[in-house]
Image: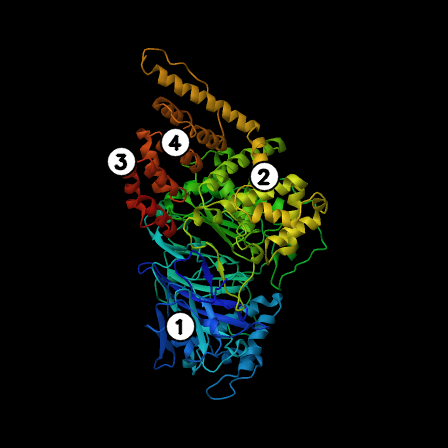
Amino acid sequence: MEPDGDYNPDTDDLPLRANTNHILVRHYVLDLTVCLDKKIISGSIVLFLEPCSAEGTKTEENVRHEAGKSARQEPKKDGTVFESHIQDPCLFQAANAEEFTLVLDCCDLDVSKVEEVDTDSVSAPLGFPSKVASEEISVGSQADFIQHLFSMPSSQWRERHQLFLLCSRSPGTQNGGLVHFQTDRWSLQVRKAGVTSAQGFPRIIRIYYETRPLGGSVRWTKDQDNRECVYTAGSPINNRALFPCQEPPVAMSTWQARVRAPSDCVVLMSGEEQAVPAKDGDTDFLLWNYYVTMPMPASTFTLAVGHWCEVPAESPSAPEKEVEYGADCCSPNAEPVSGLPQIERGSPLQPGSRGEATTADSLCCRSSLGDEELSLTDYSGMVDDSISCSHGDYPCRFTERSAWSQRVVPHRVFSPVCLLQKAQMGVLKLLPRCLAAAHAILGVHPFPRLDVLIVPAGFSSLGMASPHIIFLSQSVLCKECPSSQLNKLSLTGSRICHEIAHSWFGLVIGARDWTEEWISEGFATFLEDIIWTQAQQLPLPQTAEQFDLQALLRWRRLYDELQNSKEELQILRPNMERTGQVSDTGSSLVKHALNPDKSFMQVHYLKGYFLLRFLASEVGDLQLIDFFRLFVKKYHGQLVLSQDFLQMFLDTFPNMERKGLTLRAIYADWLDRPGIPEWLHERSTVWSQARLVEEVKAEVVKWILSSRSHQAKSRKRKRTESKVNYKELTADQLVMLLELLLEESELSVSSMRALQKTYSLQKQDAEVRHRWCELVIKHAYSQAYCDVEHFLLQDQAMGVYLYGELMVQEDPEQQALARRCLALVQEEMDQSARRVVEEMIL
């Protein structure tokens, strides 16, 4: 690992350049303006910094950067420093190799100015020393003041946030010209003349910048109503093209953000209180303020701005132009903080106090399904009150008794107008049921509220969870407005449950090393089945049958993926014994993060899921769920490695090691090797004999016999057609049916037509329709090419590999279909998806 050396741009590893072992960002204050017409977000970000107690080695390695385009700074009349590109990559560091450099993760940003912030106007009224000289601020006095902010107890978080905000609006220092900066491909580097250590570096700096329209962290596109919008993409590079930050997960921080957006837009963001927009003077913009008090990695920050509408609880009857927007939903105001200067209306400090118990039909919880309708099993049988919070001090919901009894947190759903009814029936009515089921299984909700947004068609996955907000693909919505039967909402419900599960595994507990994605995705995949069956209130026998069917479907998917991928991408812990290690500065590389193929692989989801199934088979399902609750109680608010979970599991169930199940054995079988563990091979045989699977097999036989009969009768058209009675199947069974039929070398046109009609395949969920499209392509059933085209246009999150199927058949009509669809959607496609598809087609 040489993250501090020259970086090879051809590698698929992602560099995390921030020197987090030297200095940490403890708090961000963003002040941004969103210009939809220019496709730019501009403004400033203020960083509140704290040097690490044991500072790493400071050498030229701290600031070495990618060869090629570089930059130098030239002083301007106001004393600041602006970047201008030059050819000498060593000039910046050669100026004074002994000076300390703050390195931030940054790309695709145009930084115009970096300045030190003068906090005298805020610190002096609180009794801290003011300027000690006409041109300088005492480093010690400013450090003491900032340390005072960091050390304020969580009970005073409002006062602390107001002080952060006031500091962020303080002017730059008069000698700000001594702050120099440079950008390269992956980082922003900042120095102050004469400062040789992190301890002497300014505690607050302000960075002025603009995003670029093609920046990898931000997606500028149009929604399903053809209206401009933007959202953070959750791409492999995370938020470094949205704002300069420290991307390594260990750099956990809090933040406040003020976002200006056109008055006809809604701004959704990670934030603990629902924002109440305020007028921005006489402009046509509104101000939206959000904040968080729980320290989290900068990668979890999420923003979406668009002309979306809040989904009403009842079917919209008013004209579309009268549909209620999120801006109309208000929350109570807090009392001003005494003794401090007041901030204008709409600041992050206005909402009411946190910690008040809120029920499903409280403020801004729009669902019509009340708590009283949810009769759910409570799995909490192993609560250990001796386990207390082990994280740093912040206002933690796990210590609030009222939060433990809050089964359904306030929630809203937003979508384009054209999808309001589908979002209402398919998402809004399911949310309280899924939230209550997750609470019954895992306990207190880590976050006090939830927004769900139906994102544009070009979104690259089925869902993405962030603090307080979930993005859902339109592909999870039913093709037509669904009935009230929950089994018709299988894909919608399971995906909602998957994203809700990330609140516990992925967000409130995060991976300390990004290569260990299974800690997030494997757990969410395992828990989505449990939460969804709980939400449906299925009896235990039916639950077990459903689990077995899902396990077999996932086994088939994993087996197919491992047969068609490089071994190096199949390993859950690619850094093995070096997992979690970083360089002396704190920088590192995330293996394969920039490989476009990896973004469409599910090995971390599936292999991680099966590892947990294996552990459940050893100790029992209910016992493993109880253990999850203990693990959450111990590790919430922290970052973990695989060994933290596995060692606690072995300590909790000591008989496992007596049976030969050790940490080393789990690493060897599941985490550090490619391929499939032996247990999984053996277990798949059992799943393939489950009752629901046997029902599908019986139907497959009928279809195969029918197809052969049609082929035999094609020369004897006058013979009477015999009628076959086909069994009604669930959506998951239909997926299995179509997968098994895909193994047939030939199906008659009549059978394809009958399949389509019998199961109304065009009206099924996206998982079923995807398998149907594969079948259509394989058997060149041209009458249903329109189904394939519709899928590629409307279900972009799932359709990537259908392009490959169309091309590999070497059928001119199918290849023309692939090229036509790509031409129609390439501008709105996710960049990674577009790159993969273009390689298939071109």
Q: Position of residue 522 (x, y in %)?
A: 55, 46
Q: Is residue 115 visible?
A: yes
Q: Earlier in the sequence, mark 3 or mark 4?
A: 4
Residue 812: mark: 3
The three-letter code of the residue at mark 3 reads: Pro
Q: What residue would you read off at disc 4? A: 775
Residue 182: mark: 1
Alpha carbons under labels 3 and 2: distance apart: 43 Å
Alpha carbons under labels 4 and 1: distance apart: 54 Å
Q: Earlier in the sequence, mark 4 or mark 1?
A: 1
Tag 4 secondary structure: helix
**Is residue 488 left or right of 620 when viewed as pictured?**
left
Tag 2 secondary structure: helix
Q: Earlier in the sequence, mark 1 or mark 3?
A: 1
The three-letter code of the residue at mark 1 reads: Gln
**Image depth: mark 4 or mark 2 in front:** 2
Q: What residue would you read off at disc 2? A: 678
Q: Earlier in the sequence, mark 3 or mark 2?
A: 2
